[in-house]
Image (cartoon, grey):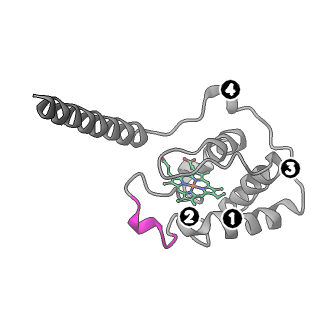
């Protein structure tokens, strides 16, 4: 009887895990929107000459594995990741977002996109500024 109860517990735990994973996957599937109050947050580095170069250095270290050397979402790790795939920074979708929204997404992450809150604000704004510079090409 005891063993039977134990296996029931194992089954219940496994079921909870599967349900949890399914919820996580569903949560990461829909459109990813930054909270409305982030939209108007201004980039303090707009017009800062060094920011693009600094942002590129940070991206080359932290982001290329997934987002690729030109930010097109085709880094070497991208193929192995489940959808949603790493964003193409040069896409119309990302270009349509405000600096504040991109900053928030870099800070918080979602699914396979890691949160980058451990990078100082200044570095995250450099990344935003670099991403913007790719879109203007
Ligand atoms: C392990 C892979 C991985 C790494 C490393 C990574 N990303 Fe991402 N990134 C993703 C994935 C996957 C998404 C799509 C997430 C989604 O839509 O749920 C994403 C989405 C984004 C988006 C959102 C685009 C949008 O507007 O919807 C931005 C911006 C971004 N990444 C920036 C960065 C920056 C900057 C770095 C480096 C500091 C970085 N990412 C590193 C995987 C990664």
Q: Distance between the residues labelled 4 and 3?
A: 20 Å
Q: Quadrant of residue 64?
A: bottom right
Marked residue nearer the N-terminal end (4 or 3): 4
Q: Residue 67 carries which label?
A: 2
The answer to whether the beta carbon of the residue marked 1 is less than 8 Å from any atom of ligand 1 is: yes
Q: In which quarter of the image is the N terminus?
A: top left
Q: Which of marks 1 and 2 is nearer the N terminus?
A: 1
Label 4 element class: helix
Q: Does the residue labelled 2 lie within 8 Å of ligand 1?
A: yes
Q: CA separation, marks 3 and 1?
A: 16 Å
Dots 1, 2 in contact, CB < 8 A: yes
**Residues drawn in magenta:** 75-81
Residue 128, above or below 3: below
Looking at the rendering, the quadrant in which ligand 1 lies is bottom right
Which residue does the numbered mark 3 point to in the structure image? 45
Q: Which of 120 and 106 is in front in this view?
A: 120
Residue 46 sits inside the magenta stretch: no
Query: Which numbered mark, 4 or 1, is in the foreground of this view?
Result: 1
* Distance from Cα at disc 2 to Cα at disc 4: 26 Å
Measured in 3D between alpha carbons, the distance from the residue under mark 4 to the one under mark 1, in whole angstroms, is 26 Å
Which one is earlier in the sequence, the residue at label 3 or at label 2?
A: 3
Q: Which of marks 3 and 2 is in front?
A: 2
Residue on which disc 1 sits = 59
């Amino acid at each position: 009887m005891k063993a039977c109860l134990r296996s029931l517990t194992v089954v219940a735990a496994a079921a909870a895990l599967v349900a949890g994973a399914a919820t996580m996957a569903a949560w990461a599937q829909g459109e990813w929107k930054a909270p409305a109050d982030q939209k108007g947050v201004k980039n303090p580095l707009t017009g800062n000459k060094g920011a693009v170069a600094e942002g590129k250095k940070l991206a080359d270290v932290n982001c290329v594995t997934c987002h690729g050397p030109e930010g097109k979402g085709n880094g070497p790790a991208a193929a192995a990741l489940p959808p949603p795939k790493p964003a193409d920074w040069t896409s119309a979708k990302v270009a349509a977002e405000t600096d504040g929204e991109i900053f928030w997404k870099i800070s918080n992450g979602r699914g396979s996109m890691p949160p980058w809150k451990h990078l100082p604000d200044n570095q995250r704004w450099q990344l935003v500024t670099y991403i913007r510079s790719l879109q203007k090409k």
